[in-house]
Every structure is written in C-alpha cells, then in structure tokens.
C-alpha cells in the first residue's frame, strides 16, 4: 500500500495588505492537509470533500453548506459559521478554538473524540450523533476477506475510507457501515470491487455508492 498517488492539497492564505482570498466550492475532492488562512467561503458549497488533517484559521463560512464531508483531525481556529449548514458530515478528532456557530444547523452528522467546548453559540445539537470513544466494528472472517480484496484499490486507499494504514482498518467507517447494512455489508463491499471508485472521497459518498449497489440488485 505504498503511496504512489497524487493528493490534492490547497494552500490559500491572505497576507496582510492583500485582498481577502476566496475558498470556492469543491466537489468530490480529497483535500488532505490543506491550509486555509484569513479567507472567505461565504455562500460556498462543499460536497463530498475530505478535509482530513486540514487547518482553517479565520475563515468566514457564513451561509456555506457542507454536505457529506469528512473532517478527520481537522483544526478550526477563529472561524465564523453563521447560518452555516452541515449535513451528513463526519468529525473525528477535530479541534475547534474560538469558532462561532450562531444559527448553524447540523443534520445527520457524527462527532467522534471531539471537544464540543469550541462550538461557541451553538443552539441545537439534536442533529449530531456523538461518540466520546472511538468505536470498533465487528470484524468477521467474511468481512476481513472482502476487505483484503479491496486493500489495493487505489482510490479507497488514498481516501483512507476502509484502511487508515497498511495494518489499521478504518473502524469508525466500518462501524457506521455495519450499523446501516448489517450482515449484508460484506456482499456490498464485494460488489464495490467491480465499480468505479474515483469519486468516492468521503464516508457519505461511500454509503451512497453502496446504496446504489443495493437498490440495483447487483448483490
């Protein structure tokens, strides 16, 4: 599983005296370890974007929409989230410092090992499922075999959706998939091996792909 693929990485910084730069809409991108400082993302939409290990400082996300995005080890410092919408997003081990979430809405989102004290002025947590401890999946022999079949998939490997490293499973994603698909998960993942995967960048995108396989009776 050597890293032989290209990873997107955005470095967008507005320095003193410059016109404030804009972080524009993104779709199905793996933006690992991006660095965004003093920028504007107002009214932008981010769909199935993986911001693993990225850093945001003094970014204005007013009225922005995040749908199906992954935030693993992402840090937010002094960011503004007024009237921002998060739908079907996953936050794992994130850090928030002095971020204003006034009138921000969350729906069907998951927060794991993340201190919510940095969510200033947040009004409603009902759309967030919170796990204080990193969950683990039930690794059956059948599931282990099919995961080995997918281990060399270039896209899933790059986006770390099933494996975090050569030896570590992505237990969080597998746990969530098991909750959704139960015993049918190994067969669904087996069918995934014969499908295009270049656009599968986040957990939600993976889930939607498996939903399509299930409804089309491929398995």
Image: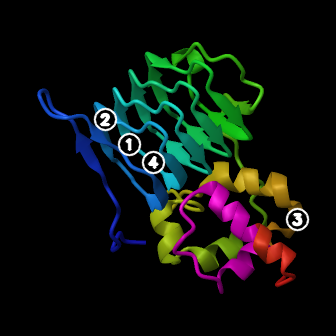
> Where does the image place residue 168, in percent across and percent down from the top left?
54, 57
Report the disc number at residue 183. 3
Residue ID for mark 2: 39
Report the disc number at residue 51. 4
Residue ID for mark 1: 54
Image quarter where the C terminus lies is: bottom right
CB atoms of marks 4 and 2 within 8 Å: no
1 or 2: tag closer to the N-terminus: 2
Q: How is the image coloured?
A: rainbow
CB atoms of marks 3 and 1 within 8 Å: no
- Give me the C-alpha separation between circle 4 and circle 3: 30 Å
The part of the image, by quadrant, that contains residue 187 is bottom right
3 or 1: tag closer to the N-terminus: 1
- CA neighbours of label 1 inside 10 A, class few (<14), some (14 to 19), many (20+): many
- CA neighbours of label 4 inside 10 A, class few (<14), some (14 to 19), many (20+): many
Question: Image check: 218 left or right of 9?
Answer: right
Q: Residue furthest left?
A: 17
Task: Determine the secondary structure under disc 2.
Answer: strand
The part of the image, by quadrant, that contains residue 149 is bottom right
Span shown in magenta: 187-210
- Give me the C-alpha separation between circle 3 and circle 1: 34 Å
Membership of 208 in magenta stretch: yes
CB atoms of marks 4 and 1 within 8 Å: yes
x 79%, y 67%: residue: 211
């Amino acid at each position: 599983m050597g890293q032989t693929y290209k990873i997107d990485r955005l470095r967008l910084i507005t320095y003193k005296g410059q016109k404030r730069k804009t972080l524009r809409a993104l779709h199905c991108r793996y933006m690992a370890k991006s660095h965004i400082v003093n920028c504007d993302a107002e009214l932008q939409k981010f769909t199935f974007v993986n911001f693993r290990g990225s850093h945001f400082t003094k970014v204005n996300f007013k009225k922005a929409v995040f749908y199906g995005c992954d935030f693993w080890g992402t840090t937010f410092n002094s960011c503004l989230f007024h009237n921002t919408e998060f739908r079907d997003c996953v936050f794992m081990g994130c850090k928030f410092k002095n971020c204003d979430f006034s009138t921000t809405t969350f729906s069907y989102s998951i927060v794991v090992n993340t201190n919510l004290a940095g969510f200033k002025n947040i009004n409603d947590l009902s759309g967030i499922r919170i796990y204080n401890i990193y969950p683990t999946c039930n690794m059956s022999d059948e599931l282990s075999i099919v995961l080995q079949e997918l281990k060399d998939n270039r896209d899933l490997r790059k986006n770390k959706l099933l494996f975090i490293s050569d030896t570590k499973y992505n237990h969080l994603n597998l746990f969530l998939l098991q909750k959704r698909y139960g015993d049918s998960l190994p067969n669904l993942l087996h069918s995934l091996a014969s499908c295009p995967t270049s656009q599968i960048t986040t957990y939600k995108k993976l889930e939607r792909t498996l939903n399509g396989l299930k409804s089309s009776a491929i398995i």
